[in-house]
Image (spheres, grey):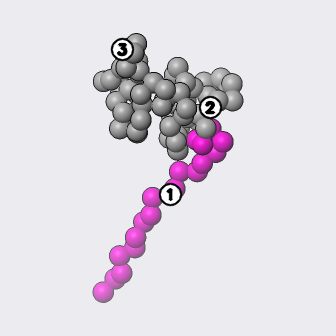
Amino acid sequence: MKKRQIQRVPKVKKDVQTEHCCAVPYHGCKYGEDDFYCTVTTHKKPQSFLCEECGVDGITNFKILKAVLNGTQACCPHCRHVLP
């Protein structure tokens, strides 16, 4: 009997942007990089943590962050602005 080989999904490699930057355009890259270079703002890699501005804007978990990025929820409760 042949053993089945288990294929593992490779881990997403982290970088300085995944640890500090935010995918929400109004929060963006914390290093002042153009959106073309930041791995998080270009959505090449997911951010590891919510940024400080997310907490201020009421984005308290990744479920809310995903809704904001999908345009199904306002980016912050006080302005009710929905991302395009």
Of the residues shown, which amino acid type is indicated by label 3?
Arg
Label 1–label 2 contact, CB within 8 A: no
Q: Is residue 49 above or below residue 72?
A: below
Instruction: Count residues near mark 2 (Cα–Cα under 10 Å), then give few for <14, some for 14-19, many for 20+.
Output: many
Q: Give the magenta range.
A: 1-19
Of residues 8 and 60, the one nearer the viewer is: 60
**Count of numbered circles in the view:** 3
Q: Position of residue 30 (x, y in %)?
A: 64, 29
Of the residues shown, which amino acid type is indicated by label 2?
Cys
Q: Position of residue 38 (x, y in %)?
A: 62, 31
Q: Is residue 37 above or below residue 77?
A: below
Residue drawn at (52%, 20%) of the image:
26
Answer left or right for 38 relative to 10: right
Return the residue at label 3: 80
Return the residue at label 2: 38
- Disc nearer the start of the sequence (3/1): 1
Answer left or right for 55 relative to 15: left
- Disc nearer the start of the sequence (2/3): 2
Rendered image quadrant of residue 31: top right
- Disc nearer the start of the sequence (1/2): 1
Residue drawn at (55%, 24%) of the image:
27
Q: Position of residue 40 (x, y in %)?
A: 55, 34
How far is disc 2 from disc 3 in space, using C-alphas? 26 Å
Of the residues shown, which amino acid type is indicated by label 1?
Pro
Q: Position of residue 79 (x, y in %)?
A: 40, 13
Label 3–label 1 contact, CB within 8 A: no
How far is disc 3 from disc 1 in space, using C-alphas? 38 Å
